[in-house]
Amino acid sequence: MGMTGRIVGATVVAGVVGYGVYRYRNSNSGPSYQKMTDPEILKKLEAGYNKLANAKDCHSLLKKHLTKDVLDKLKTRKTELGATLLDVIQSGVENLDSGVGVYAPDADSYTIFADLFDPIIEEYHVGFKKTDKHPKSDFGDVKTLGNVDPDGKYVISTRVRCGRSVQGYPFNPCMTEANYKEMENKVSTTLQGLTGELKGTYYPLTGMSKATQQQLIDDHFLFKEGDRFLQAANACRYWPTGRGIYHNDAKTFLIWLGEEDHMRIISMQKGGNLGDVYGRLVKAVKEIEKRVPFSSHPRLGWLTFCPTNLGTTIRASVHIQLPKLAADKKKLEEVASKYNLQVRGTRGEHTEAEGGIYDISNKRRMGLTEYEAVKEMHDGIKEMIKIEESLK
């Protein structure tokens, strides 16, 4: 029988509990990690570090924050589920044009590889320092959020989404085929028990008929296998096993199961009634959580696969036409900045506004509650409409 060591503060506590597997702790709390000694992985980590260091056109947060000291400190760590630093960085090493470049293979990675994740999180979620703590989840009083455009002149549609991971399961790179099947069964059974306006149908991607597939494409509901960034992060294994789509009968509530995250929960409808859209999302999240517990972190809030989507994980957005305000791009960006909003084209980041329609959403996801994140978008859009109406 081998000895194991657990470092608690500066003290090593040893015990005979396995076959030569050493477990360590950074502090008195948090997950322990194992020693990683695979020479092939160590070789790939050194090669990856050198590739990033020599890539003059690479400006990712991974390149910036993976210093030699951080590499040397983390390269021999492994989570209980077997995730290594290579799993964290491989997408960013393969795709040098990444903006961020890291993913978390499991929930414990955020703690065990914190020396890399924390500075990336602080830079992306502007100012959320490693000493900061995300507030307790609070959806607030949904009744205080009404229609941002009661006359229906400007807002084309409203959408609020959040991500959730199912407690007890790793994230995509560490999921086995059995994990995918088991999680799909657990979540789809829960979804099929939803009632009222949330009642709907679950469509597994495995064995999906051409007719169903076409209908979901026409509704803009169907998601595809991951892009090259997710592929490189090993996020698309056993595709399409365990993946599926649920939507309610009215097509105003949608869940993607097993895409980038375990669950993407989405509420949407035509027009500007943010109160209805947000209320539906809150109701769904609370109903699902009664039966399926979600992964969270005492400091980072709700956990998902990508560090850009932590904390509240909420993105509340509208598609909106503001022809007069949009003619003064500087003014538009100024108002957006005041309310911490992001302005982009309707096809996503770095795209132009088609037909003068913009996608405007909350920018902040960490360091504030769900209600506060949505309220920022609510107040900012109301202000933009007010300015639009005051312009001659």
Image (cartoon, grey):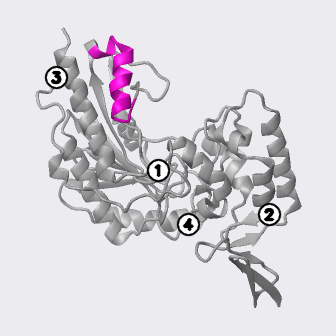
- Closest to the observer, 190 or 201: 190
Q: Nearer the viewer's eye, disc 1 or disc 4? A: 4
Q: Is residue 247 visible?
A: no
The amino acid pointed to by label 4 is Asn
Left or right relative to 147: residue 41: right
Question: Which residue type does callout 2 highlight?
Answer: Thr
- Relative depth, front residue between 307 and 40: 307
Q: Position of residue 94 (x, y in %)?
A: 73, 39
Return the disc, 2 or 1, that comes first in the chain's sequence.
Answer: 2
| Dots 1, 4 in contact, CB < 8 A | no
146 to 28, vertically: above or below: above
In which image quadrant can residue 64 be found? Answer: top right
Which circle, 1 or 3, is nearer the viewer? 3
Front-most of residues 89 and 269: 89
Q: CA distance from mark 3 to mark 4?
A: 47 Å
Q: Main secondary structure of the magenta part?
A: helix
The tally of labels here is 4
- The circle drawn on residue 179 is 4
Image x and y of residue 292, in percent: 39, 69
Q: Residue at x 38, y 23 (%)?
A: 333
Q: Residue 270 versus residue 225: which sits nearer the camera? A: 270
Which residue in the structure is indicated by mark 2?
76
Disc 4 crowd rating (10 Å Cα; few below 14, some 14-19, many 20+) is some
* Residue 88 in the figure: left or right of residue 144: right
Report whether 179 appears left or right of 376. right
The dot on residue 205 is: 1
In percent of width and height, residue 59 lies at 68, 32
Mark before the other along the chain sequence, 1 or 3 = 3
- In which image quadrant can residue 283 be found? bottom left
Q: Which residues are magenta?
A: 325-342
